[in-house]
Image (cartoon, helix red, strand yellow):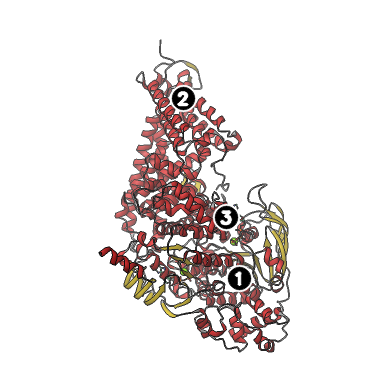
Amino acid sequence: MKINTRTIVAIGIGSAVFYVLNRFVSIPSGIPNTSINTAYAFLAFMSTVFGPLAGALIGFIGHTLTDATMYGSVWWSWVVVSAFVGCAVGLCQNKVNVEDGDFNSKDLLFFNLYQIAANIIGWGVLAPVLDILIYKEPADKVFLQGLTAGAANLITVAILGSVFLTLYAKTRTSAGSLSKE
Amino acid sequence: MFFGVSCFIFMDITTAVEFRNFTFQYRAQSAPTLYDINLTINKGEKVMIAGPSGSGKSTIGHCINGLIPHYYKGAITGKLLVDGQDTAEMDIFSLSRHVGTVLQDSDGQFVGLTVGEDVAFALENDMIALPEMKQKVLKTTQTVAMDPFLKSHPQELSGGQKQRVALAGVMVDDVDILLFDEPLANLDPATGKSAIELIDETRKQSGATIIVIEHRLEDVLWRKMDRIILMDEGRIICDNTPDEILSSGILRRYGIREPLYVTALSYAGVKITPEMHPESLNSMEVSDYRDVLMNREKQITPVSQPSPGSEILSFRNVSFSYDEGGRKILDNISFSIRRGEMSAIAGKNGAGKSTLCKLICGFIQPSAGQIMLNGADASGQSIYERAQTVGYVMQNPNQMICKAMIREEVGYGLYLRGVQQDEIDKRVDAALKTCGLYPFRNWPVSALSYGQKKRVTIASILVMEPDLLLLDEPTAGQDFRHYTEIMTFLQELQSQGITILMVTHDMHLMLEYARRSIVLADGKLICDDSAARVLSDPDVIERANLKETSLFTLAQKAGLDDPLNFIENFISHEKELRS
Amino acid sequence: MATSTKILSYIPRETPVHRLCGATKLIVFLVWTIVCMLSYNTFVLLGALVFGIIVFRLAKIKVSEVRFVLITILVFLTLNTIAIYIFSPEEGVKIYGTRHELFRFSSRYTVTQEQLFYLFNVMLKYFTVVPIALLFIVTTDPSEFASSLNRIGVPYKISYAVAITLRYLADVQSDYVEISQAQQARGVDLSRKAPLKKRISGLIGIAVPLIFSSLDHIDLVSNAMDLRGFGKNNKRTWYSERPFSRADYIVIAVTIIAGAMALYVTFRNGSRFYNPFLPK
Ligand SMILES: Nc1ncnc2c1ncn2[C@@H]1O[C@H](COP(=O)(O)OP(=O)(O)OP(=O)(O)O)[C@@H](O)[C@H]1O
Ligand SMILES: Nc1ncnc2c1ncn2[C@@H]1O[C@H](COP(=O)(O)OP(=O)(O)OP(=O)(O)O)[C@@H](O)[C@H]1O
Ligand SMILES: [Mg+2]
Ligand SMILES: [Mg+2]
């Protein structure tokens, strides 16, 4: 396997950041049980910058860690969904050019198309199906749960994820652009 | 036969590093950062690279260890040979067999969960079997005296101890070139001194070539260096022995602080020559200059501070520990600061200086005692309310920066307070000029060096115009020119009535700018007195890991009666020169 | 926004459970969660729970040391159970195929034996993994974790990514605390009083420096690792790896046999559920 060290470190530290954001940096949105959670915006951001493998693993490790240390238990169904969302958003890596300083609205559009699809499939379909298969929970409940979580994440990523990407792209400089004035 | 020949050639190589007409330009830059470098460093030599901030010192280091071009992309012309091999044909792994790098940030370099794992890291990658690995790790940690800490976590170690671990981590691989990028930046004076001793002993034991990049020239010269390489704007200005370089006075011209005793002697009109061996005060014969030095001395009464105003901050029996019932980081601290004062907080790594700053800002609450701000109990005030009075520049600039671009970052606090945009622009420009960042104002923060980032955070607090300015190591990693600019500006602020409290490891800065210093050791406040008196008390120096400055040593060696007055003279003379 | 940074982590002790290799505990943990995930058989779940509690005692972990986690999970389980009932009061009837009504709140919300038994099983299923997951977390030395992953077949680079997470977790957490304080000092308002839009921009004000400083960290650490030869070979050795002892082999063997038996019991009669309502 040929993965470069930077991706490995991004997975490692990214998972730690995912955990910290998940635990501390979220605010209730006003709708019960759903919050504006920066962790998923961060996940989408890292997937776009570091690719699908990094996205999948940050989602997987970060979510497992959160579950394990907060609840003393791991819900693999939702962990798998986090990994799926990370991976799916990461597929836009080649379409969205954040590194060279010419990030524009077309890139932003692609990013959002991917993340919308990823969130709908992940939270709206995959999560409830797994919940039914594994835990035999009632279908209406898990679909409603999945869809609210999906919608909340989708909106959060659309706002915060786009902000993160735009700010990051600004720090990337195009070749030969820096000179003292 | 063929093997024999190549082997012979390999054995014959005496140069460790050789740059030939080497030029490098970062991908993002519009001009090269290194121009036409020609430099040879021989095996077993010990050289220092000095130069102003942004002159390309770290860039040279990155070329030698292979991060350029492995990580930093750009255009290279010319040749670079390491151990006789062309680096163009080597990848970073084969280079890492020759060059061991100790990065400036020893915290970031500490990749293992414990000391043992971190030291073993390179061996693990080389697939060394477990028994042999354990043995090697033990042996190497013994040479840096860290073997009792094999199971310790990075959070439990002091800055100096982490540096030792970093050194062990590269030594374990038997490399023959050791590269240090600002090893002293965050160390207290005594720890810095022992770090230099450790580097020297390493060389004696292993015969490795040593390359040290540092701003603190005098501290590095605590042990003998073979050569100093002076850089400016990406070129090598001068490459010679310390004795020659110190005699030529060239360092001052490039805005680098020479050893204080050298400066003092030349102020006194002594002509420094290589024969005097100015590289070390110990080896210099200074008693001859007693009269010259005496003659110049005027009796100086310390410049009177602006008449002390009302109390702005006071600590009353404050104690603090991070976890309830745990170790007391601060124990029963009491002091008070008056308006318009400029004071320093000093003490060894981990003594609780940054913790004290956080208490003042209300980031954390005392577990006992009281903090008064502007004469009122501060315990009920939120972080934001306190921030109206106190501006805090944190030790680590990365924790403060939240905008991508320099201008936005500096103006962000004003924006949050709802200040008009044109007013913001005006104040931001002024602060950027003060901090020497105006030419970079439209750059992203990420393209700056560490020292430059630190200045960005100072600027972002300056624009807020607080009454009490709290600076955590404002000059760490700065070159002398920017150091002087920042400090001069702070003095100006002080004369306008702003109170300044700064944490520092720089003893001369303390003497020169802060007339009062508060010294912490092991959680206790052990001394609160004028800086000069603090530094003439051997007991305080010992307990708080401080160091007397070489001016003091010089005065003593030359047999002057009143070393403190000598130092006062020096400082006031420098002030005259500047104005 | 929470400020407590308490976190469940390794508690070193001298017990037989602590002495087992990390890889062994990882295998037990994985088999355990897989079995509990697949099975809905009351006896299997109860057995696993009881056995988990026994091992828990063996490891000399006090309940007070994990109390905050236990409370969180119990709250979660209660809410979840109530939610299931609200959404589908007849789920048990659907599953077990019979109907023994006890009483009713309204025409929709009836209480049946089947539903109660189903809800009991759901809670049990969620709760059974708790003792073993807690045990795994508090008795496994983080230093050993990466090598354990590698040993059970995870590629070493990915295993090392997990080691990095464990190494930098505390750093990122204290970074977060300091950043949020510095931003509050500059005027970022995070209190509940602030309007939503302001709070969102406050979130950005904290998340962005945390992300940027982490990106810096990523560069720094990956450079440090490259400079020390990470990834030059197809394998690597591990300083903190321990050799398997006899106890390890025995525990692994027992776990796998017990796991297989549990699955056999579960799927013996074609359904994952144990059905007490079935006419004999
Ligand atoms: N990754 C980069 N991309 C573009 N420019 C860079 C990069 N790194 C450094 N530079 C530029 O190269 C110049 C030299 O930087 P370098 O880090 O070598 O300076 P330095 O002498 O080590 O300074 P300091 O003493 O502050 O550490 C600076 O002007 C800096 O802006
Ligand atoms: N968040 C924290 N939790 C627990 N302990 C801490 C925390 N921050 C610091 N400490 C401990 O408190 C002590 C004092 O730390 P502090 O950062 O105040 O030292 P300092 O005097 O600023 O050192 P330096 O000169 O290296 O900056 C250290 O032993 C450190 O390990
Ligand atoms: Mg540098
Ligand atoms: Mg400090």
The residue singled out by tag 3 in the image is: B157
Q: Image height check: is B567 above or below A57?
A: below
Instruction: Using the image as rendered, state which of residue C84 and residue A7 is in the foreground.
Output: A7
Q: Is residue B174 above or below residue C141?
A: below
Q: Amino acid at mark 1?
A: Asp
Q: Residue furthest top?
A: C280
**Residue name at image x 39 percent, y 60 percent:** B97
Subunit of label 1: B
Residue where numbered disc 1 is placed: B506
Q: CA distance from mark 2 to mark 3?
A: 45 Å
Q: CA distance from mark 3 to mark 1?
A: 22 Å
Q: Which amino acid, by three-letter code, is at mark 2? A: Leu
- Camera-side residue: C278 or B142? B142
- What residue would you read off at disc 2? C45
Report the mark closest to the observer, 2 or 1: 1
Quadrant of the image for the N terminus of chain B? bottom left
Nearer the N terminus, badge 3 or badge 1?
3
Q: Badge 3 local density, few (<14 within 10 Å), some, or many (20+)?
A: some
Disc 2 element: helix
* Image spot of residue A154 (x, y percent): 39, 46
User: Are callouts 2 and 3 both on one chain?
Assistant: no
Identify the image quadrant of residue B285: bottom right
